[in-house]
Image: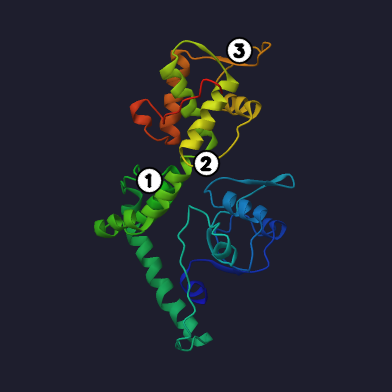
Amino acid sequence: MNVLHCLCRHALPLTGVSPASFRSLPSGGRFTFLITQPTLSYSLQNLFDDASKRDQKIPSRGGLLDLFGVQIFRSESFLENDCWPYRSIKIPMIHTGQAVPPFDQETQERIASEFQAKLLDFRRTKLTAARSLKFDASKFNATLRNLARSLATATPDDRDLQAEIFDLLWDQNEDLRSARWIDPSVIAVEALLVACNESPGEMMYVAELSRLAEATLRGRGEEATIDPGVFGKRLKLLGFVTEPRDAKGVQLQLTDKVRNHALALARELGAPESENGRAGSAHVADDA
């Protein structure tokens, strides 16, 4: 962390950070936050996530805060719970007991003086090339695309290094792809597509669709019960309009419009096999 303090632009070492104290920092500073503390609360992680989005302001006490900046964390939270953000690069630090050269104040000042000037010169000479770089990040999950583009932009003239980004982030990309298989919205869309393929044009109760979703989850090794009421709210959030409730419950007509909307959502959400118009497969037993 001390080395990064020497190298990074506008570095700001912090510890003991809380949501309130982080909001009290100067707005628009564009710092590189070097945060060292044992744990990060869930609310603090959410605030850091909000602050990591460029040109998006955070409402606070009647004003708008711009707390965007590079964030570097050294925390046991990410080691114990493996809850580190996907839009980041994880660097394991292993204690080896090996002796390292002294890193006194004089050494730190020498590194900062030499390398910050070189890095600033690199930024100025490469800025035009970086702004015009066309890097295809479409193979990555949407969560990782900005990170991949940022890494590619750092070396706009080096195609070999840009090619290595796919290897660097591919494991994270596959983890996200696996998580999508059990995402509630993906499961809901897949259940709808199965229903549309098997019973086009018919009316189907939301309770039946929720059982299709449960069958899809079981097929992926997840034992879960889906409440029809919760499932119906999920459908509404996704933009599907159900019929008025009758004695047996709420229904949805499986029209071409519903199927086309489900296909569009499947592609947007990255549902498995969405390119074939069939997202997964499931069947409800006759006695279900």
Mark 1: which secondary structure?
loop
Q: Amino acid at mark 3?
A: Glu
Q: CA distance from mark 1 to mark 2?
A: 25 Å
Q: CA distance from mark 3 to mark 2?
A: 30 Å
**According to the image, label 3 marks what residue?**
243
- Residue beneath the point at 46% across and 66% down: 91
Mark 2: which secondary structure?
loop
Residue 275 sits above or below residue 74 on the image: above
- Residue beneath the point at 32% across and 56% down: 167
Q: Give yes or no for contact between labels 3 and 2 (Cβ–Cβ under 8 Å).
A: no
Q: Which mark is on residue 140?
A: 1
Tell me the quadrant of the picture where the C terminus can be found: top right
Q: CA distance from mark 3 to mark 1?
A: 38 Å
Question: Considering depth in this image, is 37 or 61 the residue closer to the camera?
Answer: 37
- Residue beneath the point at 61% across and 46% down: 57
Q: Which mark is on residue 198?
A: none
Q: Position of residue 6 (x, y in %)?
A: 49, 75
Q: Amino acid at mark 1?
A: Phe
**According to the image, label 2 marks what residue?**
222
